[in-house]
């Protein structure tokens, strides 16, 4: 009957409203994560983009794992379209601005 149909529709509507709310929460979480990632990229971009006279243009990893560093580098585009990575020479480097970025997977330009 009509009353049963209305009850069913109301129940369905409530379930959909809950689902929409869940999706909105997820979107907010993703937006927050996205902003955090953009902040990290902004923090390291001066070191990526700059052509400092004391730099050789190679990105030396602060962590001694070339595989992890290479994976991180793939997410970053250099101005010249490529980024070189080297962990073997990272000891004894004096790090340029990217050293202040708060993430363990950051690679930065090393200046001797």
Image: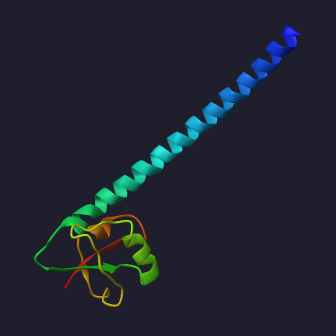
The C terminus, quarter of image:
bottom left
Left-right relation of 111 to 20: left
Task: Using residue 65 as the reference point, say whether residue 47 is left or right of it.
Answer: left
Q: Residue furthest bottom?
A: 88
Give residue 1's position: percent from left, percent from top. 89, 10
Residue 107, picture quadrant: bottom left
Q: Residue at x 21, y 65 (%)?
A: 49
Q: Is residue 86 above or below residue 99?
A: below
Quadrant of residue 69 within the rendered picture: bottom left
Q: Give the residue furthest to the top.
A: 2
Query: Compared with residue 27, is residue 20 higher up or lower down, i.e. above or below?
Result: above
Q: Eyeballing the image, is 69 above or below 112?
A: above
Residue at 68% x, 30% y is: 18
Q: Residue 52: horizontal and vertical position, in percent? A: 13, 73
Q: Nearer the viewer, residue 7 or 100?
A: 7
* Residue sitting at x 35%, y 54%: 39
**Residue 112 vs residue 22: left or right?**
left
Q: Of residues 93 and 1, which is closer to you in this image? A: 1
């Amino acid at each position: 009957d009509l009353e049963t149909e209305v009850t069913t529709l109301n129940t369905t509507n409530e379930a959909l409203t809950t689902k929409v709310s869940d999706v909105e929460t997820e979107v907010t979480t993703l937006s927050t994560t996205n902003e955090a990632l953009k902040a990290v990229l902004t923090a390291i971009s001066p070191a990526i983009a700059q052509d400092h006279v004391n730099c050789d243009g190679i990105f030396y990893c602060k962590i001694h794992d070339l595989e992890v560093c290479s994976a991180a580098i793939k997410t970053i585009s250099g101005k010249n379209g490529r980024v070189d990575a080297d962990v073997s020479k990272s000891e004894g480097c004096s790090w340029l601005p990217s050293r202040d970025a708060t993430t363990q997977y950051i690679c930065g330009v090393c200046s001797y």
